[in-house]
Amino acid sequence: MNTHVAPGLELRVTPRVLSIAGTDPTGGAGIQADLKSIAANGGYGMAVVTALVAQNTCGVRAVHTPPVEFLRQQLDAVSEDVTIDAVKIGMLADVAVIREVRSWLEANRPPLVVLDPVMVATSGDRLLEPSAEQALRNLVPLVDLVTPNLPELAVLLGEPPAENWSEAVEQARRLSAATGVTVLVKGGHLTGESCPDALVNSHGLLADTVVEFALPRVETSNTHGTGCSLSSAMATVQARTGDWADSLAQVKAWLHDALVHADDLEVGAGNGPIHHFHRLFAGKAPVGQEFSRSLWQDIEPTRTAIFDLPFIEALGDGTLDEAEFSYYLAQDALYLNTYSRVLARASALAPTESAQLFWANSARVCLEVESDLHRTWLGADTAPRKLGPVTKGYLDHLLAASVQGSYAVLVAAILPCYWLYADVGDRLHARFLARGDGSVHPYAAWLETYADEGFAAATRQAIAFTDEAAGNASAQERAAMRTAFAQSSRCELDFFDAPRLHAGASS
Ligand SMILES: Nc1ncnc2c1ncn2[C@@H]1O[C@H](COP(=O)(O)OP(=O)(O)OP(=O)(O)O)[C@@H](O)[C@H]1O
Ligand SMILES: Cc1ncc(CO)c(N)n1
């Protein structure tokens, strides 16, 4: 089962994101901001320092650029050990640094690279030698997304700065056309009530589209590091969602609130930092992975009970009675038909396009791929099957969740169907391989369907969408999600036990 949104991109719930940038000892910009931004957006942050900057909220005092050999040692130390899902590149200081990062990128291209073409700090101080501008221009075609502010956009094009938003978007179009790279043009430097950003594309499927997001401009002078924070957040969220527009919508909303709470921090006398962890400090419920992890912990007894079932034991070692397996599969075929409609309902309720696409695709794949297995196994046996009592109970629960209208509760009800099957498939398959006796497993096709990496990837996405929904849900809704998840898990347990109880009665 393959439900990836963007082909070739391995989406991860907790992406491993590397920032290659300069430092800010006051913690508001550069690498320090990147690490906070990556973590605040659910990633695992790593950092390679290009330059040490003696700066604070008022300005830059000095820059020390270590030898590029040492930069390369840092880059290699990370990439020879860790799989990097996304890279954000910030301050590059001079030509030698750009050359070294470029050479490393050419040898170790991670799937996702975001370039923030840092040239000048919020304070007006230069962070890139003017002689390095051409080298930076030449780096742009190597990346996936470039995030210039208006003066940087002008320098990259060798044109005067845009004076208004429509000129800026036109310039972004020209940069995208010249480089083949998606441009995130930022309106932070304009004035006016609204603060627009736009994703501009000139190539591929999205050719000539401009996706614009504007949020109200926040009345604050504490905007130090917004550009750094935006670009590293984009790298992180994109590695999880695979959709630039969805990523920008999420990141923009987060950044807006980080600006709203910036004044609370009272850091420095100049342009202070934004509040990266405003959501955590606001005492909001667990977001990101924490919520789904706690769901999984809640159902520990149910998971243990599943692995203790005679049905699962026998399915794993291949000794399962064929009549019981046939009963199970026939009930599962009935189940999957309605389940597919429940997935389609999740798609209809989904708050973002990437979620909508994921659930719609899941509805299709579940009918196609899984019912293939059933057709093959059940063969010409087309005798009408009666809905067993456990199957009916499970479907009633899912249908109830799908009609009561909460997307969050519905996805929580759906999730055990992914997660428990991925877990059972993985463990039983590993157990079979560990036996290593070369025997043919009678239920190998079943094990392979659920131990498959594609199914695991889909499960990770379903988990991420559930966490995302939890992050936007009220405390009451999250409690209902917990109940729905636990209830579906018990249904899964009963479903695996049903053949033992009912196979003889009606198959
Ligand atoms: N006052 C504000 N209110 C709301 N959003 C803002 C404000 N200032 C900047 N932004 C947003 O912050 C992000 C960074 O934009 P900006 O154009 O300031 O980039 P930058 O100049 O690279 O940032 P930096 O200040 O780190 O140098 C954009 O998403 C922009 O829309
Ligand atoms: C190190 C560093 N990178 C980027 C910026 C831009 O804000 C900054 N001030 N410092």
Image: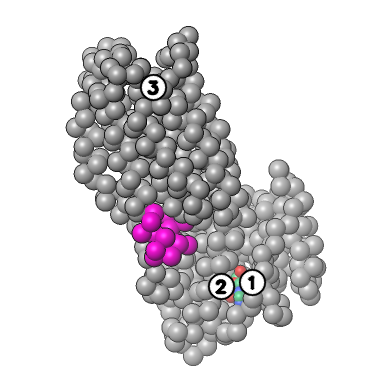
Q: Say whether marks 2 and 3 touch (CB < 8 Å).
A: no
Q: Name the residue that disc number 2 marks.
A: 256
Q: Which residue lies furthest to the top in this view?
A: 380
> Dot 1, crowdedness within 10 Å: few (<14), some or many (≥20)?
few
Q: In this view, does 24 lie to the left or right of 422?
A: right
| Kind of residue indicated by mark 1 | Leu
**Picture disc at residue 329:** 3
Tell which quarter ligand 1 is in.
bottom right
Residue at image point 68% right, 75% down: 194
Ligand 1 has an atom within 8 Å of the beta carbon of the residue at disc 2: yes
Ligand 1 has an atom within 8 Å of the beta carbon of the residue at disc 1: yes
Q: Mark 3: which secondary structure?
A: helix
Residue at image point 29% right, 23% down: 502
Tell whether position 133 is magenta: no
On the image, the x and y values in percent for residue 464 come to: 44, 50
Q: Say whether marks 1 and 3 touch (CB < 8 Å).
A: no
Q: Mark 2: which secondary structure?
A: helix
Most common secondary structure along the magenta stretch: helix
**Magenta region: which residues?**
467-481
Relative vertical location of residue 36 with respect to residue 343 in this rendering, above or below: below
**Picture disc at residue 371:** none
On the image, the x and y values in percent for residue 324 come to: 29, 18
- Between marks 2 and 3, how big is the CA–CA gap? 50 Å
Upstream in the sequence, badge 1 or badge 2? 1
Ligand 1 has an atom within 8 Å of the beta carbon of the residue at disc 3: no
Upstream in the sequence, badge 2 or badge 3? 2
Upstream in the sequence, badge 1 or badge 3? 1
**Picture disc at residue 215:** 1
Relative vertical location of residue 224 with respect to residue 403 in this rendering, above or below: below
Point out the image quarter for the C terminus: top left
Residue at image point 74% right, 61% down: 172
Relative vertical location of residue 313 with respect to residue 301 in this rendering, above or below: above
